[in-house]
Image (spheres, rainbow, N blue to C red):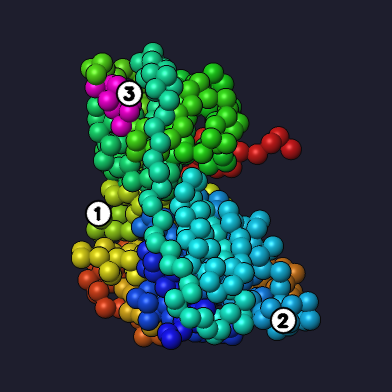
Amino acid sequence: MVEVTGAQLVAESLKAQKVEYMFGIVGVPVIEVAMAAQAAGIKYVGMRNEQAACYAASAVGYMTGRPGACLVVSGPGLIHALGGMANANMNCWPVIVIGGSSDRNQETAGAFQEFPQVEACRLYSKFSARPSSLEAIPSVMEKAVRTSIYGRPGAVYVDIAGDMVNAKVERTKVRGVSCCSPPPVSLADHTAVTEAVALLKAAKAPLVIIGKGAAYGRAEAVLREFVETSGLLFLPTPMGKGVVPDDHPNCVSAARSRALLQADVVLLLGARLNWILHFGLPPRFNPNVKIIQVDLCAEEMGNNVRPAAALLGDIKAVVSQLVALIKKDGWKYPSNTEWWSMLREKAAANTKISKALALRATPQMNYYTVFHHISELLPHDCIIVSEGANTMDVGRTMLNNSLPRHRLDAGTFGTMGVGLGFAVAAAAVERSREKGRRVVCVEGDSAFGFSGMEVETMCRYNLPVVIIVVNNNGIYSGVDAETWKEMAKLGDLTSVAPPVSLLPEARYDEVMTAFGGRGFLVRTVEELRSALQTSLSDWENPSLLNVLIDPSSDRKQQEFPWLTRSNL
Ligand SMILES: Cc1ncc(C[n+]2csc(CCOP(=O)(O)OP(=O)(O)O)c2C)c(N)n1
Ligand SMILES: *[C@@H]1O[C@H](CO)[C@@H](O)[C@H](O)[C@H]1NC(C)=O
Ligand SMILES: [Mg+2]
């Protein structure tokens, strides 16, 4: 008689569903689950906070199309993971959280770390359940993984009662469940496709917006063909960057505001008309703009703006339909239109302003100087992880992506603290690939602090992440060291220090050296370039560049504020 434990069933079921990575923190009752996962051939990455573990697992889901698993203990462990589940669900990224919970016979008795976990996860996931017996584990796992990747991807939760982890059952009594099929692909209604092409042909100022749904849906090849066949101009959303390369001649990122404002027809590909796209409404959009919406989620159609055409289906398949129809017609948007030349001029003017800011000779560097030099040195195929406010926003405009799914940032939910978990995940995935790519993590000093201890995780597993902390002594801005000292004389700092401020010239680089990685304190362009070159040539160790910039450095004047608010 061969017996199998609950832990083994969880691990083997995950492996059977092609889950390759698990991130987590062990303790009672899940230590055996992590060990069983390794025994089943799943890579286990022990993290320092469940939040970061869940961010990491969801990043694997986005990059590979297969959810990463996040393993947490009961009560507080699970609570910490909720932030990661919410972030994944908002981003529509698959992740499977496995939570140990208290023993069934102690429920309601005040058991150790007892919490209503299945109920708690419901608000943060697409699916939240607990297998009722050991025999039920494989099918519940299959359903969880399937749910995370079918339809609109998202977070799922499976609860494992503590007493089930080490309980045993005869293997022959457990029905094996094979791997779920890849998500079924559906095409858009042919009439809607015809309407969409007619709208594009009649447009004077058409614009394609490429979202991270297109990146997740692996539509890069067909989308590039679509852009080049149709001759249309495109604008990526933050994580849509790289699906078609940022330096493609049809990319109008540098004239984003103008392109959004004056487009008369927008083809929305795997992007939502939420706050990132200013709801598709005035003052940021033309009130008469016609939206052609391509999405795999029917409920998304009509959010904020009623679409002129709704193309429901798999993005890769639907874009193929568009390409086929355009090719049949032999239609191409002319490249000598006013729309083209206006956007080109605007883009050139904006780029010139950024460049002038970057090259301004001042004693301290500003955001533009830092990103100008970083962009010259980064390999074109690197994965850029980024978070912060100014750091993320300025960095996004100045750091190009040429490959899809190579930018991971604060995303739809605007979550600070995601960066280091994403970077750990990206580096782990890249290391398993034949030609692993560089992972560069560009962090504001505030953003870095949320998950800063994951530096130890990077050092422990020799993950050669290059972290660049753009340090302005605060959230959006800070004060310099001298002013800070003067301020301390004026009264208790909790009363007088600006709430945005953080410790001036904090030595984040020493967090890295504390664990054996490379740390650099950087004040000048020369130091920045040399530290970055050294870091990029080291594939054994992680590095952290603590780049001190002018704490009063700001974003250049914008036509519109970044966030569209109601008129208060
Ligand atoms: C979890 C979470 N907490 C708080 C915030 C509010 N917030 C937005 S950006 C930001 C940090 C910005 O500072 P930093 O990372 O140093 O970037 P900077 O703008 O200074 O370059 C914070 C705390 C958030 N978005 N997410
Ligand atoms: C980034 O792309 C833009 C075009 O969108 C191009 O002008 C710029 O030179 C590129 N930057 C780098 C560093 O390649
Ligand atoms: Mg800052």
In the rendered image, the vertical position of residue 140 relative to residue 486, given as above or below: above
Identified by mark 3, the residue type is Trp
Residue 322 counted in the magenta span: yes
Quarter of the figure with the C terminus: top right
For disc 3, the neighbor class at 10 Å (few under 14, some 14 to 19, many from 20) is some
For disc 1, the neighbor class at 10 Å (few under 14, some 14 to 19, many from 20) is some
Which circle's residue, 1 or 3, is located before the other in the chain? 3
Question: CA gap, disc 1 to disc 3?
Answer: 26 Å
Q: Nearer the viewer, residue 111 or 7?
A: 7
Q: Which residues make up the magenta segment?
A: 320-327
Q: Nearer the viewer, mark 2 or mark 3?
A: 2
Q: Tell me the tag on residue 216.
A: none
Indicate yes or no: mark 1 CB to ligand 2 under 8 Å: yes
Horizontal placement of 18 versus 89: left or right? left
Q: Can you identify the residue that label 3 sits on?
A: 340
Res 65 → quadrant = bottom left
Which residue is at 61% across, 38% downward? Answer: 564
Which circle's residue, 1 or 2, is located before the other in the chain? 2
Identified by mark 2, the residue type is Asn
Horizontal placement of 419 versus 352: left or right? right
Q: Can you identify the residue that label 2 sits on?
A: 105
